[in-house]
Image (spheres, grey):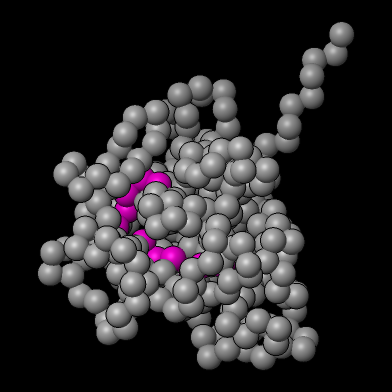
């Protein structure tokens, strides 16, 4: 009797590489770092095995989330990037689809988050840690709303918990929302689209992960926008995105698809992809041996809605 066929392991795709760090597009379904069962693949171990070098963890994405993920390639870069995340100097931009209709425009969710056991997080005014999310409702289509969100703090499951508390859980989230309803969707509709971070060299690095087909195809079915990967028949918005004539409020930033991550050949150097802010690629580091292994005085712009213990109901100011 032949052993059962195992599902293919999703592979991270290269977005940017230099001597200090590597940025990849992590697919949904792949853990960022090793899980308790070390036999289960993770982005870190796959990359280390493929490249033959040790990588340092800088931040994480939930297993169910796709998008831009950074790893440091040396200890000094690891410290510099970790401090940038700790000091909230990294801009993180997510694209998500939520249940229900959110009012158009911008909003702020200011609700403390605490752990409740069994991997779940929740709002807890007494035990929770300060958690802040800014968001913009891009387009609503009946049962769903497409949202751009920027978490200003880095709590576990922050976006998932905040939008669940708002009454608009992320589509496909089996932890938060009606599980029977959520299980009818093939993936969690949450994608880490862009990271803008201080580079260890002193400049700022911006990397962007295009929406994967698993996200864009489901989005096209649930929230039809008639968008394509090209620019035919469309006008660019001032921010550089592609606006659909049918849905002018929706902006899709189209970028070229990331290329599969190449394995290193003996004695060769890695392909360097220069950052958009650089005119020349960064020098690659030599081969390395693989080793086993807003507060109470928060600022709120005029006209921005807010959710907090002092503003228990959603309102437009």
Instruction: Locate the C terminus and report the quarter of the image it occupies.
Output: bottom left
* Residue 103, horizontal then vertical, whole percent: 47, 74
Q: Identify the magenta region.
A: 146-157
Residue lying at the far top of the rendered structure: 1
Q: Nearer the viewer, residue 225 or 37?
A: 225
Asked if 312 appears above or below 129 in the picture, the reply is: below
**49 relative position to 285: left or right:** right
* Residue 156 falls inside the magenta stretch: yes
* Residue 144 falls inside the magenta stretch: no
Q: Nearer the viewer, residue 160 or 269?
A: 160
Q: Quadrant of residue 166?
A: bottom left
Asked if 121 appears above or below 7 in the picture, the reply is: below
Asked if 78 appears above or below 275 in the picture, the reply is: above
- Taking the spot 68% from the left edge, 43% from the top edge, the residue there is 184
**249 relative position to 282: left or right:** right
* Residue 252, horizontal then vertical, whole percent: 61, 75
Residue lying at the far left of the rendered structure: 297
Q: Nearer the viewer, residue 233 or 225?
A: 225
Asked if 40 appears above or below 221 in the picture, the reply is: above
**2 relative position to 288: left or right:** right
- Taking the spot 54% from the left edge, 61% from the top edge, the residue there is 100
- Taking the spot 24% from the left edge, 76% from the top edge, the residue there is 300
Instruction: Locate the N terminus and report the quarter of the image it occupies.
Output: top right
* Residue 219, horizontal then vertical, whole percent: 68, 62
- Taking the spot 21% from the left edge, 58% from the top edge, the residue there is 309
Residue 53 in view (yes/no): no
* Residue 311, horizontal then vertical, whole percent: 24, 65
Residue 168 in view (yes/no): yes
The total number of labels drawn is 0
């Amino acid at each position: 009797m032949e052993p059962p066929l195992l599902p293919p392991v999703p592979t991270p795709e290269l977005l940017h590489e230099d001597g200090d760090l590597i940025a990849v597009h992590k697919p949904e379904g792949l853990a960022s770092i090793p899980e308790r069962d070390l036999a289960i693949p993770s982005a870190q171990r796959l990359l280390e095995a493929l490249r033959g070098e040790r990588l340092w963890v800088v931040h994480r994405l939930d297993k169910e989330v796709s998008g831009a993920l950074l790893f440091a390639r040396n200890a000094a870069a690891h410290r510099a990037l970790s401090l940038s995340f700790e000091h909230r100097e990294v801009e993180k931009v997510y694209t998500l689809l939520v249940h229900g209709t959110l009012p158009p425009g911008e909003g702020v969710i200011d609700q403390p988050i605490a752990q409740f056991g069994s991997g779940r997080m929740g709002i807890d005014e007494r035990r929770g840690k300060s958690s802040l999310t800014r968001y913009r409702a891009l387009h609503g289509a009946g049962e769903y709303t497409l949202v751009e969100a920027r978490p200003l703090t880095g709590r576990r499951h922050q976006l998932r918990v905040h939008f669940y508390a708002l009454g608009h859980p992320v589509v496909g989230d089996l932890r938060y929302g009606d599980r029977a309803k959520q299980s009818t969707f093939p993936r969690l509709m949450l994608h880490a689209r862009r990271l803008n971070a201080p580079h260890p060299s002193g400049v700022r690095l911006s990397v962007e992960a295009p929406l994967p087909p698993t996200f864009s195809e489901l989005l096209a079915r649930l929230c039809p926008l008639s968008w394509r990967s090209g620019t035919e028949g469309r006008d660019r918005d001032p921010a550089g995105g592609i606006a659909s004539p049918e849905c002018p409020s929706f902006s899709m930033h189209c970028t070229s698809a990331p290329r599969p991550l190449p394995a290193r050949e003996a004695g060769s150097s890695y392909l360097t992809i220069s950052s958009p802010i650089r005119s020349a690629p960064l020098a690659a580091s030599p081969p390395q041996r693989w080793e086993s292994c807003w507060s109470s005085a928060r600022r709120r712009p005029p006209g921005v809605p807010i959710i907090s213990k002092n503003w228990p109901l959603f309102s437009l100011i």
